Amino acid sequence: MTQQPPDIELRRSRRRRERQQFFSYSSLFAIGLIIGIVGSIWLAWRVFPLEELVGSPAVFQQTYREEYLYMVSEALAQTGDWDAAQTRLGVLEDDNLPQTVVQELERYLREGRSAEDVRNMARMAQSLGAEGAALDLFAPTPGAGEALESGTPTPTLIVVVGQAAENQQGLPTATPTLLPTPTPIPEEVVEAEPTATPLTAGAQLAYELLSQESVCVVDEGSAEIEVFVQDADGDGIAGEEILVSWEGGTDRFVTGLKREVDAGYADFTLSAGVSYSAELVAGSPRVSGLTIGVCEDGSAAGWRLVFKRGQ
Amino acid sequence: MQRNLIVLGFGLLVGAAIGFYMGWFVLPAELVDVSPADLETEFQADYLRLIASTYAADQDLNAAASRIGSLGRQDWPQWLREEAVNQVIGDPTGIETAHMVGLARAMGIESPAFDQAIPPTPTAEPEVSQ
């Protein structure tokens, strides 16, 4: 066994110490670096941000963003205040807002939201100048709007007339109970009979009743009021709202949600022992006495009403 | 020992410089995915007015209560009363005032000021025949 000379041993020992010291310095520097980075990022974000962090609807979670759009559309429908709606929509800071609202409208349709919600959202999208297939179907059409503004409706239509006119003019919306009762105008009420009778409505109504007929229920189906709304050429019109009323209640449904049947088709399930009336909100004769009938084979019968837009 | 502290301090300084640069310029702080509870006071007040108008439309008190709850305010009854009163004072005939008062009353909140809210009247009045 050979023995190393003392100077070589000393050099090795010094190098070893230097290496250990270097690693010690490196470790200390790295620790300081990491603590410095983490600490200063925390300070930069939480304590000394360069810009003040403002919680606004622009940074809403998607769920709340959708909720916000819904509430703005409802408020717009209620107040008719387009300026306020624009301000509220503006804080969303959405560069593609019209398209966002149309997408929301399409989501409503897919989820089967109420006709009221769909119409309010469509109206807001239309006010934003949005375009889209869904909007074409469900936004108020100029023809319907004119009918709403100029029609001399039956007393039951007064509320709708008031709301539509005021919303377009940006004026406060009157609640139904606040409206004075208008001069009664003879209503065109069509008593539903088992035999269908085509009728012609008055010139001031947007739609005329083209036909009404009893429809036997097939298979396991339920008795319904089937409504077809057509334009002057006989093509279905989507987005038309139908007001159905009975003793102690009303409801609304809208055409276009069952496009596999027809763009202008909508239906409403009848309950036994209840007499219903139906009319188009845009203005049409009111068909009353719609009850579940009985067909020759003993099956239940509903009603099919066809409304056609006037020339 | 002193040399160790100098090295550690140098590391901290360099780290702080990198961190501040990153935190201010490269990855600045921004709020994302906030809830109504995170809204600024001004936005919360407007959100409350929206809740009131929506309640006026759908009359769904549970939904309105849930939406108010999402604002995360423990003092919501007092706050709702204050906002409704402010609304009455600012615009006694406004339709949003009517909505706020309606919501407050539906929540069981009252104030003498609410009686001063005048329901809006339609501007175009159809003829009335007796």
Image (tube, grey):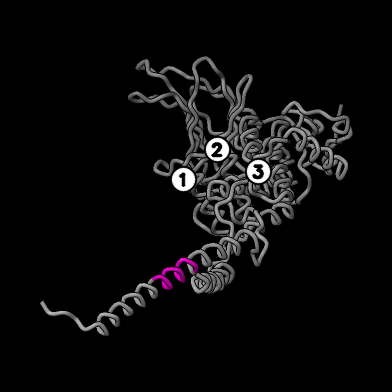
Residue type at mark 1 is Ala
CA gap, disc 2 to disc 3?
12 Å
- Which one is closest to the eye, mark 3 or mark 1? 3
Label 3 in the same subunit as label 1: yes
Q: Is residue A27 magenta?
A: yes
> Contact, CB < 8 Å: mark 2 with mark 3?
no
Whether residue A262 sits left or right of residue A156 in the image: it is left
Q: Is residue A282 magenta?
A: no
The residue identified by callout 3 is A74
Q: Residue at x 79, y 35 (%)?
A: B81
Question: Mark 2 falls on what kind of element?
Answer: loop
Q: Nearer the viewer, residue A267 or A13?
A: A13
Q: Position of residue A192 (x, y in %)?
A: 55, 24
Q: Position of residue A10 (x, y in %)?
A: 29, 81
Magenta stretch in the rendered image: A24-32
Quarter of the C terminus of chain B within the rendering: top right
Q: Residue at x 62, y 19 (%)?
A: A247
Mark 3 belongs to chain? A
> Contact, CB < 8 Å: mark 3 with mark 1?
no
- Main secondary structure type of the part rendered in magenta: helix
Residue type at mark 3 is Glu
Mark 1 belongs to chain? A
> Contact, CB < 8 Å: mark 2 with mark 1?
no
CA gap, disc 3 to disc 1?
26 Å
The tag on residue A114 is 2
Question: Mark 3 falls on what kind of element?
Answer: helix
Q: Position of residue B56 (x, y in %)?
A: 70, 35
Classify residue B72 by image quadrant.
Answer: top right
CA gap, disc 2 to disc 1?
17 Å
Mark 2 crowdedness (10 Å alpha carbons): few <14, some 14-19, many ≥20: few
- Which one is closest to the eye, mark 2 or mark 1? 2
